[in-house]
Image: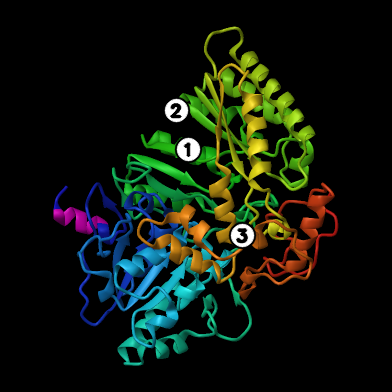
Amino acid sequence: MSRARGEREFWTGICYGREKPPVPEWGGRLPVALVFAQPAATALSTLGWQVVWRLLSARPELAVERFFWEGGEAAPRACDSGRPLADFPVIAFSLNFEEELRSLVEVLDRAGIPARRAARGAGWPLVMAGGPLAFLNPAPAAPAVDLFWVGEAEAGLDALLADLARAAGAGQGKAGALRAVAGRPGVYLPGSPGAPARRVVPAGAPGLLEAPGRSCFVSPEAEFRDMFLLEVNRGCPYGCRFCAAGYVYRPPRHAAMGELMAAVEQANPVKVGLVGTALTDWPELLPFLRWLAGRGTKFSLSSLRADGMTDELLDFLRRTGTRSLTFALEGASRRLRRAANKNLDEDAFLDAVRRVSALRFNHLKIYLIVGWPGETGEDYDELGDLLGRMAEAVRQGQGGKSRGVEHVTVSASCLVPKPWTPFQWAPMADEAQLEWALGRVRDLVRPLRGFRAMLERPGPARLQALLARGDETVFDLAELAARPGMGWRRALKAWDGDPGAFLDRERGQDEAFPWECIDTGVSRDYLWREWERYKQARPSARCAPSGCAGCDACGLGGWLADGE
């Protein structure tokens, strides 16, 4: 591909192969380092970060350059120009996973920039952060960050940076630039008084996802190799009580098929990866997949709901070359799934397994979560029965033939009670409890022919929960972990904090949380009632497409009294 063609495609929003975007001129612009605190391969397969890059790069007031973090002792430099991070007056972190708190400290430290906001003083750089962690719980990162963007990037992040550029251009300095944007929607300034910062969402028609995300970079170096990522929907209507995405991305919205078709026509990729939290809820899923197949474009889907797998969709997927499917089971028993508000019909689930086997899919992956509050051995006895019926459904689908689903992977992860879910009041299971539950899963799967267990380790899950639920004192732990030769395991031993205070007790109804410096739009009273309903194993209704009088994320107020 010629350089001229590469530049033309960059300016329409796509870089292919190993091409890099043109390096922006700094003259008259505010230089912004857009830092993804993980390796480049992960960034190039992360849609949210690419959406931010596209938005900011389109602003003439800004000179945006990409930074990735591979670890090590070298000073971080821009991916495209090689400029050192310390040269940039604005450093914007995209924080997606709790463990990236350590990377944030490492990046600043290796650049020779004090990690703590107080130590940097009044001068530049201004360190800001956005991404899911910014509106789940910014407290652990707050000692390092001058400004958090709270909400979805399309709701005004680029305008915020443009205002910072104007303030900087007027010679106001960092303090003046922060004053210029203080109090605006979506801005949280740690240490500043005032009401909680409200998460912002783009305005639009109810249920419609305006400007769905799409890849800027399609690369063989990405984790999803050479794949053009395309956002189908955002948010989820089912209200599973453990799922942070189902609460902080309310209200749920779907993309318009015509807009996705236009994006594919413009990019003309070899393969499209559809991204969303509830793909089978999108009414246009099958028509869109047929359109992709008709133009010779390969596609890949994320996890699917078994009850959304119609015969027509399954047959189409198999005929077009899909060999592996993923279904989410979540809870070990009907009681736990009902308590978690996981609306799953076992008969429909088993029927989907049977049909998948009959159509000769090669691999089926089942997601399971262990460590639920109040789980017992009886729940896992029931899981053993269900797994046996799954194995029988696989055999029935084979119809006596030697082929069908050849491999079933039961992937068990540990429940991490997250902020802004009903489980924010819940204790987390300790390592002994989690090891016991994972051992039960392993023992139940072992005798089943063609089945295997893939089990998460409890230690990293407990660390994730500590970072997710902690306050500003947890930043001390991240600083320890960022020291050369330390890492999280050694840092936990050296840290003088108490993980149990954040993890091992049920919180009181009126206890304040460190993340309540943010207002996600979902009321605390609603979440408390959902926690009470978990303990009573009572389900609640899903989000209605036209809105409801439930959690108040749609701004309608009130409470859906029963939902049974």
Magenta residues, start to end? 3-9
Which residue is located at x 32 percent, y 42 percent?
226
Q: With 340 as the anchor, is 296 left or right in this view?
A: left
Q: Is residue 26 magenta?
A: no
Mark 3: few/some/many CA within 10 Å (<14, 14-19, 20+): some
Mark 2: few/some/many CA within 10 Å (<14, 14-19, 20+): few
Which three-letter amino acid code belongs to the residue tagged 2? Thr
Is residue 212 at all visible to an observer of this figure? no
CA separation, marks 1 and 2?
A: 10 Å
Q: With 4 as the anchor, is 504 left or right in this view?
A: right
Which residue is located at x 30 percent, y 88 percent?
169
Q: Nearer the viewer, mark 2 or mark 3?
A: 3
Q: Earlier in the sequence, mark 1 or mark 2?
A: 1
Which three-letter amino acid code belongs to the residue tagged 3? Pro
Mark 1: few/some/many CA within 10 Å (<14, 14-19, 20+): many
Q: Identify the residue at the far top of this view.
A: 400
Q: Earlier in the sequence, mark 1 or mark 3?
A: 1
Helix, strand or loop under label 3 = helix
Which residue is located at x 45 percent, y 88 percent?
180
CA separation, marks 1 and 3?
A: 47 Å
Report the residue marked by disc 2.
320
Report the residue marked by disc 3.
499
Report the residue marked by disc 1.
289
